[in-house]
């Protein structure tokens, strides 16, 4: 099931990025 992993990997990455951006917004503009 490579398709499933490929579809979940980017989804988790986006969620992590969104959470990191929200928490890192006031700290850094990266």
Image (cartoon, rainbow, N blue to C red):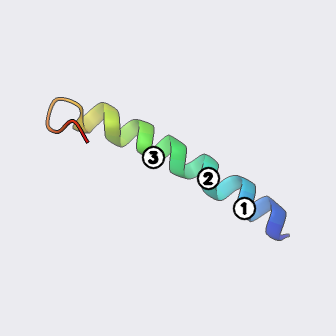
Seen at 81% across and 70% down, the residue is 2
Q: Which is closer to the viewer, label 2 or label 3?
A: 2
From mark 3 to mark 1, how far is it between C-alphas?
16 Å
From mark 2 to mark 1, how far is it between C-alphas?
7 Å
Residue 10: give its label: 2
Counting residues from the start of the chain, the first of labels 2 and 3 encountered is 2
Q: Residue furthest front?
A: 30
- Decide if residue 9 is on the left or right side of residue 6: left
Q: Position of residue 8 (x, y in %)?
A: 69, 54
Counting residues from the start of the chain, the first of labels 3 and 1 encountered is 1
From mark 2 to mark 3, how far is it between C-alphas?
10 Å
Image quadrant assignment for residue 28: top left
CB within 8 Å, label 3 to label 1 = no
Seen at 62% across and 47% down, the residue is 11
Kind of element beneath mark 1:
helix
Q: Quarter of the image for the C terminus: give it.
A: top left
Q: Residue furthest bottom?
A: 2
Kind of element beneath mark 3:
helix
Residue 6: give its label: 1
Q: Compared to 11, does 28 lie above or below?
A: above
Q: Position of residue 27 (x, y in %)?
A: 14, 36
Residue 16: give its label: 3
Q: Position of residue 25 (x, y in %)?
A: 23, 31
CB within 8 Å, label 2 to label 1 = yes
Seen at 63% across and 58% down, the residue is 9
- Decide if residue 24 is on the left or right side of residue 1: left
Seen at 27% across and 35% down, the residue is 23
Image quadrant assignment for residue 17: top left
Mark 3 packing: few (<14 Cα in 10 Å), some, or many (20+)? few
Q: Quarter of the image for the N terminus: give it.
A: bottom right
């Amino acid at each position: 099931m490579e398709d499933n992993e490929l579809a979940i990997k980017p989804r988790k990455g986006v969620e992590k990025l969104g959470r990191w951006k929200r928490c890192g917004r006031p700290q850094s503009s990266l």
